[in-house]
Each structure stands twice: as C-alpha cells, then as structure tokens.
Image (cartoon, rainbow, N blue to C red):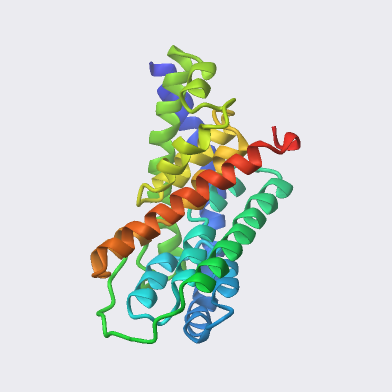
C-alpha cells in the first residue's frame, strides 16, 4: 500500500507544473474573451447552437453556469443550452494536455463534441421554438470553480491545486484497483469491450462536478474504457450547469427532459462510435 501511495504522489507531482501552465493560459484566454463571449451568446438567435458549441469547448470558469442563467431568463434557446452542455470540456482538456496526450487525440475529441453539440442543438431548436418571454433572475455564483476576481496567477494556482487533489484521489483509487484486481477487471467493470459501455460512462458524466471528467479521462488514459465510452461520458458532462438548472429553472419536468436528452445523446453517440472499427 505504501508503494501505491508513493507512486501516486510522484506521478501527480510530475503533472503539477504542466497543470499550472495550462490553467494559467486558460485563465488569460478567459479574462480576454469572457465578456466578449457573453455578448456573443446574448445576441445569438438562429446561430445559437453553432456559436454555443464552439465557445463551449473552451474550459472557462462557470461557462455552463452562465449559459444556464441565460436559458433560465430565456436569453438563449433550449438548443443553444444543450449545445453548450454537450461541448463543454471542463477539466478534460487541461488533463489531456498535462498528460502529453497526442494533439490528434485532443482535436478528435473536441471535434466530435462540437459536431454532436451542433447537430443536437439545431435539431432541438427546429422542433422546439425559442420562447420570447424573459424573466429577471438573480445571478448565481459558481462555488465549485475558482474566483476569477483574484487575478490570473492566484486563480490558476487555486484551480491547479483543486484539480490536483481530485487527480491524486482518482489515481490512488485506480492504482489500488490495478494492484489488487488488475486492469482487466476494471475494464470489465466499465464494459470496455462491450457496446453497452456508454450506458455506464454517460451516467458518470452526469455527475455535476469536474471530478466526473477527471475520472473518465483517467480511465481512458489507463485503458480501462474505450474511446466510444470516453466520448459518451464527456458529452453528458456539463460541470455544475445541470445542478444549477434544477435550482433556478422552475419547470422541473423540462429539467428532466434536458437531463434525458444529454444522457441519450451520450449513449447513442457512443453506440455509433463503437461501430467504427478504426476507433477500437
């Protein structure tokens, strides 16, 4: 057990500088584009799902929260909200970068998320027309993310340590499982070699916290789940956006419909990707 703890800490410490540099760059990008993004999303109408899915892949502080507030006030359409939820990459991108994942893999993941988000978003808006009624709703704070008012360096460090703690916990659990049961058992648990794997990972993705994207990414990097299952889980993951939706959107039935749409999109996309032989 001591060897597992030491190996986990050493592997985690190796990631720290890369995590910090990644979050520092993302913070700088966010501070430059945040207000502009809000104005773009606010003005988006028929092109909402296109714009939302493109902006959603940038891991920004509270982006899904901002979209949720916009939808609750009917500033954006349901399709735009779904597109943002599906494309939001959360902690997946910084983790892949810090782990030196291939650029081709990162581009493939982000491209699939954007394309799926656009298709589903436009389809929903085509079926359900945007409501024109607007309501005044007080802005809510995202307590799970960093406080961006404290400067990019401090925010980057805070976010790095926050994610680092999750990585250490997840890595420790995985390493312990690998040591006592073996990687094959973990793969079987998440149905790596089965078309039904997306059923499980899509549920993990719905966990309203960045930990779900960390778990999914770590599982994939450790060969415990396949690519199709990874995409399924990352599609359903929208940070705490879905949690905030249930808090501020009075139409609970509609909230559950959104939840079901996210889950089915993840599962169906996983099914289709699993059928592609070159992804195995």
| Residue found at the far top of this picture | 180
Front-lying residue, 130 or 142:
130
Name the residue located 39 percent from the left edge and 48 percent from the top edge: 206
Front-lying residue, 79 or 179:
79
Hey, which quadrant is residue 54 in on the image?
bottom right
User: Does residue 267 show up?
Assistant: yes
Q: Relative to residue 228, is residue 18 depicted above or below?
A: below
Name the residue located 44 percent from the left edge and 56 percent from the top edge: 261
Point out the image quarter for the C terminus: top right
Name the residue located 64 percent from the left edge and 37 percent from the top edge: 274
| Residue found at the far front of this picture | 127
Q: Decide if residue 134 is on the left or right side of residue 200.
A: left
Point out the image quarter for the N terminus: top left
Q: Relative to residue 73, is residue 7 depicted above or below?
A: above
Question: Residue 218, position in %: x, y?
Answer: 51, 36
User: Does residue 144 show up?
Assistant: no
Q: Decide if residue 145 is on the left or right side of residue 127.
A: left
Marker count (numbered): 0
Question: Residue 244, position in %: x, y?
Answer: 30, 63
Front-lying residue, 186 or 267:
267
Q: Relative to residue 107, is residue 218 depicted above or below?
A: above
Question: Residue 175, position in %: x, y?
Answer: 46, 23
Question: Residue 39, position in %: x, y?
Answer: 49, 85
Name the residue located 52 percent from the left edge and 23 percent from the top edge: 187
| Residue found at the far right of this picture | 278
């Amino acid at each position: 057990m001591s060897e597992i703890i030491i190996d986990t800490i050493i592997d985690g410490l190796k990631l720290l500088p890369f995590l910090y540099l990644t979050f520092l760059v993302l913070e700088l990008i966010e501070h430059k584009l945040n207000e502009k993004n809000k104005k773009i999303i606010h003005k988006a109408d028929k092109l909402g799902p296109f714009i939302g899915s493109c902006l959603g892949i940038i891991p920004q502080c509270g982006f899904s929260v901002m979209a949720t507030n916009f939808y609750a006030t009917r500033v954006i359409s349901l399709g735009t909200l779904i597109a943002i939820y599906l494309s939001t990459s959360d902690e997946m991108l910084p983790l892949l970068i810090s782990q030196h994942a291939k650029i081709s893999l990162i581009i493939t993941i982000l491209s699939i998320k954007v394309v799926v988000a656009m298709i589903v978003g436009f389809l929903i808006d085509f079926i359900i027309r945007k409501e024109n009624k607007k309501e005044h709703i007080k802005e809510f704070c995202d307590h799970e993310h960093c406080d961006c008012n404290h400067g990019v360096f401090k925010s980057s460090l805070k976010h790095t340590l926050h994610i680092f703690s999750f990585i250490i916990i997840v890595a420790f659990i995985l390493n312990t499982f690998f040591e006592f049961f073996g990687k094959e058992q973990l793969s079987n648990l998440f149905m790596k070699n089965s078309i039904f794997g997306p059923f499980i990972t899509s549920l993990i993705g719905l966990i309203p916290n960045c930990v779900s994207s960390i778990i999914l990414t770590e599982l994939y990097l450790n060969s415990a789940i396949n690519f199709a299952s990874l995409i399924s889980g990352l599609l359903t993951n929208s940070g705490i956006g879905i949690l905030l939706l249930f808090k501020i959107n009075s139409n609970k039935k509609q909230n559950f419909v959104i939840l079901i749409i996210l889950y089915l999109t993840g599962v169906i996309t996983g099914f289709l990707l699993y059928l592609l032989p070159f992804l195995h």
